[in-house]
């Protein structure tokens, strides 16, 4: 496979752009194609079968565009569908799981909080990870409606603030010292979250770790782009592109497309 082919990235919407930003920062010479499946967001309320079907649809769209590696930039899709994707398609996949390990190893209060979607928290993959750290108290919270508000461009709305206070204050009361963000949409809420939780609570997301794993797998498969040709960063959404453009901070190479 040619090393100048693009990295494919998909998410249930715009949240995975938080992962794209970390990948682009670490691997600025890589071509990328990003799919925002906003029409079907959020994935977190769907059945495992629906999530697998949507993940296959997105993967096939990226393979049509000749992607050399696919990043499943969605915790819900990873925890519910990554096994099936790896079995079905002959391309390397990078998945995303909530970063429980660094929180569990770093906690001094022996209590950590995890804010994630229902689909992630109920998944077999997530619960296996939790069992590994049975000596740690893990306060789980489903982020009902957070993804939809982000997709609607309402990050700084009063409704968002009220929901975050409702979800986070019991975690603070429970004495967490780490907050794990178990959805790629949630890093966009960090400024809001910091207004609610005490400064000593560390916030962890998976972006940097995913970028490093992407680099590692590209190196292992001899797929790093060494070409001097101009790179392209393409973004597609099957919904209104306005919010995607807003969250990226630019509008060039951002397109609406039915997939």
Image: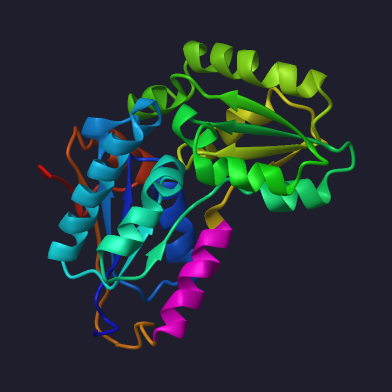
Q: Quadrant of residue 60?
A: bottom left
* On-image quarter of the N terminus: bottom left
Q: Residue at the spot x=53%, y=49% of the render?
A: 97
As for residue 216 lying within the magenta part, the answer is yes
**Residue 145 drawn at (x, y percent):** 43, 19
Q: Is 204 on the left-hand or right-hand side of 23? A: right
Residue, x 57% and y 11% (percent of image)? 162
Q: Nearer the viewer, residue 127 or 241?
A: 127
Please tell me which residue is depicted at 69% across the width and 22% down the height of the picture.
196
Closer-to-camera residue (250/255): 255
Q: Give the total number of marks visible in the rendering.
A: 0
Which residue lies most toward the left here?
258
- Is any part of residue 235 visible from this angle? no
Residue 54 lies in what quarter of the image? top left
Mostly what secondary structure, the magenta segment?
helix
Q: Is residue 23 visible?
A: yes
| Image quarter in which the C terminus is found | top left
Q: Give the vertical position of 128 relative to 85 (above or below).
A: above
**43 on left or right of 187:** left
Q: Residue at x 28, y 47 (%)?
A: 55
Which is more toward the observer, 119 or 32?
119
Q: Position of residue 255 (x, y in %)?
A: 16, 47
Asked if 154 appears above or below 206 in the picture, the reply is above
Q: Which residues, given as a range, are shown in magenta?
A: 208-221
- Residue at the limit of the structure toward the right, as seen here: 108
Residue 56 screen position, x and y as percent: 23, 51
34 relative to 103 in the view: left or right:
left
Q: Is residue 257 magenta?
A: no
Q: Position of residue 8 (x, y in %)?
A: 29, 62
Image quadrant assignment for residue 151: top left
């Amino acid at each position: 496979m040619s090393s100048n082919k693009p990295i494919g990235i998909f998410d249930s919407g715009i949240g995975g752009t938080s992962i794209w930003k970390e990948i682009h920062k670490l691997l600025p010479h890589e071509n990328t194609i990003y799919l925002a499946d906003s029409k079907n967001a959020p994935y977190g309320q769907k059945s495992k079968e629906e999530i697998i079907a949507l993940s296959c649809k997105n993967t096939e769209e990226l393979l049509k565009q000749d992607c050399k590696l696919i990043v499943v930039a969605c915790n819900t899709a990873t925890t519910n569908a990554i096994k099936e994707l790896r079995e079905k398609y002959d391309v390397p996949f990078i998945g995303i799981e909530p970063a429980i390990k660094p929180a569990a190893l770093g906690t001094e209060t022996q209590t950590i909080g995890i804010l994630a979607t229902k689909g992630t928290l109920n998944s077999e993959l997530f619960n296996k990870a939790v069992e590994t750290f049975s000596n740690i108290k893990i306060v789980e919270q489903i982020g009902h409606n957070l993804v939809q508000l982000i997709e609607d461009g309402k990050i700084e709305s009063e409704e968002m603030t009220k929901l975050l206070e409702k979800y986070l204050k019991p975690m603070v009361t429970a004495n967490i010292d780490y907050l794990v963000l178990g959805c790629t949409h949630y890093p966009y809420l960090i400024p809001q979250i910091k207004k609610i939780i005490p400064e000593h609570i560390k916030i962890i997301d998976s972006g940097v770790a995913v970028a490093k794993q992407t680099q590692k797998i590209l190196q292992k498969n001899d797929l790093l782009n060494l070409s001097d040709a101009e790179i392209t960063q393409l973004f597609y959404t099957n919904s209104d592109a306005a919010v995607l453009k807003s969250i990226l901070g630019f509008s060039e190479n951002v397109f609406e497309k039915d997939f």
